[in-house]
Amino acid sequence: MRFFSLLVLNAALLSGGCIPESKPTLTTEDYLEALDKQGIRPLPLPMEGAPVLDAEFDKQPIASFKYKTGDSFFAIYEFREKQNPDHHEQKGSVFLATNLNIVLITDGEADRLLIEVFQSLRPPISYEQAGIFIYPLGFCLLVAIFVIAERSYSLRRVMTFPRKVEKALRLGEFPDKKWKKRSAAERIAFVATKERASPGSLRAYARLEIAALEQGLFLLEVVVAGAPLIGLLGTVTGLVSVFSAMPASGGSDGAIFSEGIALALLTTIMGLAIAIPALIGHAYLMRIVEKRAASLDWLTARLIEAVAKPKDETP
């Protein structure tokens, strides 16, 4: 019960916003600083100037500026949220490009460097761009971490087959009455000595203790199989979005198309990054379970011999 309550707690923390959802934004100052590094220092223009750069949007921008550099004119429109479509458009004598929450509009003869610097402001791809799939993938990550940590603690030697038990049995000593029931080996010894269980019952109880060693490991198997599938679903969803946006962009911008493919593959990368360590952890824990199970089988056999010996010696 405690094990599953901790899983529920992990899910609650995840859904409650433990994974940050920051939304990166840009400002006109960011763009001007990037131009300054390229040796371009545009001059501000009044908003009524260069009317060809005027544009209408579905939402009102929070700020707008016009500038001139050499023979080129451009305008920057800032919004509170990311603007769509996120691609380039050629509209008559002006060129329009979006980058997160800002829109750049240049005249048709503008310096290409203006657009290249504008697009270079785009932040690198991060896990936040995985969209809604970050939540199931994050949950898989939490489950894998919790199971590996909990089983690594519970499968310690002191919790399964303490050295004092092994030493006593190797010396042929009967289990000490002062032993507690903290470990699986001590609980099996208690059943053999205190409850006077039959050999069949003792073997059955030992198998229950061995089965308890595998508690929660099936969740790692679910993560190993499920995380890549969730990532694949995110990739397919992203590819559908990319290809559905191609008609709007005319399919002419290879950079935007490549970036869209990279974003689509991000969820698959994350799914594999979660599944591979979970697979390694599962294999490691199963190896420990096998070793502990062999030790408990040996303990059970020695206890059966110790309990049955007085009966065999009775005339």
Image: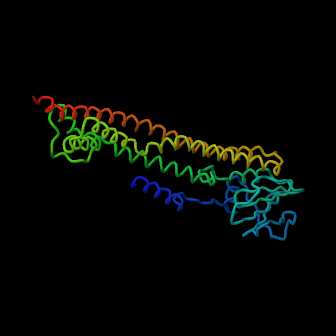
Q: Which image quarter holds the N terminus? A: bottom left
**Image position, residue 302 (x, y; %):** 22, 32
Among the 4 quarters of the image, the one containing residue 46: bottom right
Q: Nearer the viewer, residue 265 or 188?
A: 188
x and y percentages locating residue 74 in the rendered image: 80, 60
Residue drawn at point x = 77 percent, y = 64 percent: 43
Eyeballing the image, is 8 above or below 181? below
Q: Quadrant of residue 226?
A: top right
Outermost residue toward the right?
92
The residue lying at 44 percent from left, 42 percent from top is 217
Seen as rendered, the residue at the extreme front is 315
Q: How is the image coloured?
A: rainbow
Residue 91: x percent and y percent? 87, 56
Report whether 59 appears left or right of 295.
right
Q: From the viewer's side, name the closer residue of 135 and 182.
A: 182
Position of the C terminus by quadrant: top left
- Expressed as whole percent of the image width and height from the top left, the position of residue 124 reads 63, 50
28 or 38, which is in the foreground? Answer: 28
With 305 as the anchor, is 112 left or right in this view? right
Residue 287 position by quadrant? top left
Question: Which one is nearer the viewer's eye here, 289 or 242?
Answer: 289
Task: Please give the count of numbered marks on the rendered protein.
Answer: 0
In the rendered view, tell whether residue 15 sits above or below residue 298. below
